[in-house]
Every structure is written in C-alpha cells, then in structure tokens.
Image: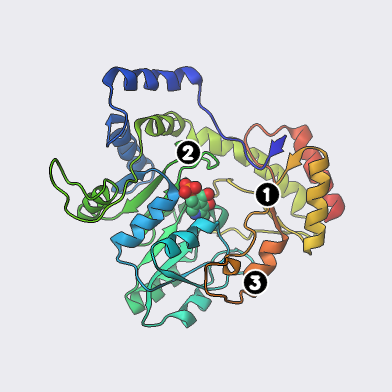
Amino acid sequence: MINVTKTYLPSLEKYQDFVQRIFESGWLTNNGEFTRTLEKRLSEYLQVPYVVLVSNGTLALQIAYRLLDVKNQAITTPFSFVATSSSLVWEGIQPVFADIDSENFNIDPKNVEKLISPLTSAIVGVHVFGNPCDDEALSTISKAHSIPIIYDAAHAFGVNYKGKSIAGLGDISTFSFHATKIFHTIEGGAIIVKDKATYDRAKLLINFGIPGYDQISELGINAKMNEFQAAMGLCILDEIDNIIESRKVVSDRYTDALSPINSLTLQHFNANATNNYAYFPVVFQSENILLNVIKELNRFEISPRRYFYPSLEKLNYVKPQVMPIADSISRRVLCLPLFGELEWGVQKKIIEIVKGLA
Ligand SMILES: Cc1ncc(COP(=O)(O)O)c(C=O)c1O
C-alpha cells in the first residue's frame, strides 16, 4: 500500500547506539541528556533562543495557550488538523473561525480583523502545508489590539520566511514531531518561546508544576518528552536537509506534471518562503471528481488523504459558523503521496490518474 506519507527512519544501528546509552545511564525521561541536547540543537537549527520539547504537538498548543493566558475566545482557522481547534476547546477557549484565503489556504487577515471583540484573547494561525501565514498583516492586527499570536507550525519545520526560520514568528510557535512529520521524534512536539522566564515557566508546566523536590508551585500537566523520543530526533536532525532535498525531487515532478492542468488548483506558496515539501495538495473542481480520483487510486493500492476534511466549523463541539471558502476547499482538496522514496513508476501512475480524471 502506498500511503500519503512514509515515516522516515534512521539507520537501526545509529538509533541502537542511543538506546544502549539510555540503558547504560538508566535515565529514561525527565529532562534527560538527549532531551537537553535536542533542545540545544533545535534552537541552533531553527535559529531561536528557546525550544521546549514536549510529548506531542497538541500539548504544545495547550501549554502555549496557558503561557499566554489565552481565555474566552481565540480567532483561528477552520482549515487545519482538528488539534488546532480541539486544543482550544479542551482548554475552555471558544474557537472563533476566520475564513481562509482561497489561494494560499491560510487564515485571511482581512477576516480576522472583523472578528476581534473584547472577548478575543489570541490569534491562532496555522502555516498550512508549510506555507507561512501573512505574518505582517496578522502582526499589525495583533499589535493594534494587544492580542498575542500563536502559530501552529506543525507542518512548517525547516521552512524559512524572508531568510529566517518561521519558528521565530508570533509570540509563540509550536511544532508537532509526530511520525508523519518530516522531522519527527515518533510522537513529540516543541514550544518556541522568546525569553528565559517563559522557557522556565513552560518547563514547569510540562512537569506537573513541580520546580524541585517537595515543591509544587502551580497547576501543571505531564507533557514531557522522553529519551527514546529525543534520541530519534537527534538521529533524524542529522539528515533533515537530505530528507527535504529528496522530497523536493518528488514534489517538483508533481508540480511539473500537474501545474499545466487548468482544472486543478495548486496551493499558492508564499513568494518570500522556502518550501519543506511536506505535502502536495491538489484541489479538484468538485467533490465528485475528488471521490472518483480516490477510488481509482485505491484500485492501485494508492492511498491519498483528504487533508483537511471536514472543515473545522463543522465539529459537533464548536459554535456553528459558516465558512464558505474553507468548506469548499476542504471538500475538494486531496494530499497526494509524497516521500523521498516514492518510486517514479508509482508517481507516474498517480499523475496519470489525477490528470485523467481532473
Ligand atoms: C496542523 C496540526 N496541528 C497540530 C497537530 C497535532 O500534533 P500531534 O499529533 O503531535 O499532537 C497536527 C498533527 O498532525 C497538525 O497537523
């Protein structure tokens, strides 16, 4: 079966060396050596001063809301993975959706401005499929209303915007390092903060609010990364540039073959950004065409993904809103299989089917 992505695994020997060291030290979790080393190496790679590693990207968002005291309502995008919204609801915050831009698929700042109210306490943007949000426009709104921005950068590891990592954008950015992401720690995530005080508070919150023996200083949770996860991250970080490069080859082949097809829409990528080639979304003219394409691909054991579907304003635990653009895109968008080892023969078949039915 060819799936939408294939988890990248480092050499077993390399990972085993780390595992052996974990066994020798007997230190499996709780801010161990590999977690601390990975935080340092990621802060260098992402060009940011403070990286807090956590057990997954959903908890990274939840801790970010707590760090910035997000309450009542947050304005966010309906076109994302469910965790962007469910994490808000889980924290008792109401997601207020601002519809997306039909070309770049990100939250449209024009729609954000209109929704600001005295109850708004944050803007939560997502760099959808690795494509950076319009940070200038969102920052202007954020400053004008003194509301922080949190970027869910789960898709955007390794993406640069105007020469700098997107990790530094917003008041806080978060990552998911789930096994399906281009950089992963099996399960995992990170919170990117700007200063030492916030870093220290985040480290406290992810460890039950326990600063040291016999002390509990505030309400916390368990969101710690363990040493086996950090070891996977250290192995993969060595190879991340090659991973992105090999995905580029596959992604470029899709672009060359599919961009001339008038009945298909491809994501309009930010001209000031680099691409990490994490996804290859295509938008068909109707949901029916998309369903036919899926059926035909499935016949060849190829499994693309309706990502993101459904649009999040349809969740049964959010206040209903009408999002015409997100709804329309989410019904028609399909992420095609994309990973470095995708064989050209298989990719040719995918292209042939998409072109034939589009
Ligand atoms: C945009 C987005 N946000 C948040 C998450 C949640 O991350 P995790 O699965 O690590 O909890 C994901 C994960 O797939 C995601 O794609």
Instruction: Give me the disc on residue 30.
Output: none
Q: Which residue is mark 1?
A: 305
Q: Which residue is mark 3?
A: 325
Q: Please indicate whether residue 25 sits to the left or right of residue 298 in the image.
A: left
In the image, what residue occupies the spot 27% across and 32% down?
A: 32
Residue 230: quadrant of the picture: top left
User: Where residue 234 sits in the image (x, y, percent)?
Assistant: 40, 31
Q: Which residue is mark 2?
A: 184
Q: Please indicate whether residue 137 sits to the left or right of residue 204 in the image.
A: right
Q: Amino acid at mark 1?
A: Arg
**Marks 1/2: CA distance?**
20 Å
Q: Total marks drawn?
A: 3
Determine whether label 1 and label 3 are within 8 Å by CB: no
Q: Please indicate whether residue 17 sits to the left or right of residue 263 in the image.
A: left
For the residue carrying disc 1, how many other residues have a C-alpha within 10 Å: few (<14), some (14-19), or many (20+)?
some
Is residue 274 visible in this depiction of the protein? no
Q: Amino acid at mark 3?
A: Ile
**Marks 1/3: CA distance?**
19 Å
Q: Nearer the viewer, residue 139 or 93?
A: 93
- Mark in the foreground, 1 or 3: 1
Q: Amino acid at mark 2?
A: His
